[in-house]
Amino acid sequence: GFPGRPAVLSTRARVPLNSRPVSRLFTPRHHMQIREASIADLPTIAMLVRESNKDVAVKFNLNAENCPKHPSFYTETWVQADLARGETYFILEKDSEPIGCVAYESPSPGLAYLNRLSVLPAHRNKGAGARLVQHIVEHARGLSVQTISIGVIGEHTDLQRWYNKLGFKGGETKRFPYLPFSVKYMSYVLPGG
């Protein structure tokens, strides 16, 4: 342990954690995997996006009247339109249960959008969102993308700080007449990009 602190003991082996191989320290207790979504996943994606964004709608007083296209109102029809437009969804599963998703779009060579990052509230603050972002970064890298762009609620400073920690840099903030909030654009430049 640290000076002045007793070594932390595992309840299983009674071996100090700091003497175990690093690979054993980070062995997940639950099997997590990310898979590419298919058309059969429309209901799952709509549910994940909708349920993961309800707290944001409450926090920023968004409703069907002042922000009808907010992700907290996501439908299977919207997901189908995303897929038809060329977006790819990835679903994060924990023990085969969907707990989050993210959409990837490449509107032009070298540029990608990370859209609708969604993690169910019960699974937040456990690395699920960061894992989905990292998956998009690796996916983009494999396609020779130089920049990944996102747009977040401009007033959602906690989310902006979280993306900053993952390597995204803040860009311009814009207001749109049809949105009751500003949009902060952020980008992640891949090495060599």
Image (cartoon, rainbow, N blue to C red):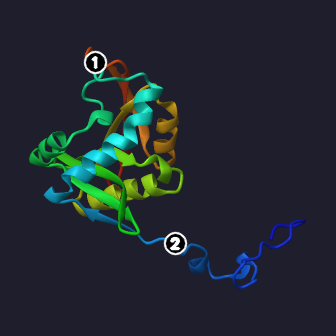
Q: Single out the residue that lies furthest toward the left.
A: 84
**Residue 146 visible here:** no
Residue 112 spot, x, y in % from top left: 24, 47
- Mark 1: amino acid: Glu
Residue at horizontal 28 percent and vertical 60 percent from the top = 139
Residue 176 rendering spot, x and y as whole percentages? 28, 18
Q: Is residue 150 visible?
A: yes
Q: Which mark is residue 65?
A: 1
The disc labelled 2 sits on which kind of residue? Pro
SS for callout 2: loop
Question: Split into 4 quadrants, where in the image is the N terminus?
Answer: bottom right
Percent x, y for residue 149? 31, 41
Q: Residue at x 43, y 52 (%)?
A: 129
70 to 129, vertically: above or below: above
165 and 130: which one is in front? Answer: 130
Q: What is the spatial separation of the Cα atoms under label 2 and label 1, in whole angstroms?
A: 43 Å
Q: Is residue 136 left or right of residue 126?
A: left
Q: Is residue 82 above or below residue 72?
A: below
Callout count: 2
Give the side of residue 153 with respect to residue 85, left or right: right
Q: Position of residue 62 (x, y in %)?
A: 37, 23
Q: Secondary structure at mark 1?
A: loop
Q: Quadrant of residue 94?
A: bottom left
Q: In the drawing, does residue 163 fall left or right of residue 3?
A: left
Few, some or many residues within 10 Å of mark 1 (<14, 14–19, 20+): few
- CB under 8 Å between callouts 2 and 1? no
Q: Which image quarter: residue 61?
A: top left
Packing grade of label 2 (10 A; few <14, some 14-19, many >=20) is few
Q: Nearer the viewer, residue 181 or 185?
A: 181
120 or 126: nearer the viewer: 120
Residue receiving disc 2 = 28
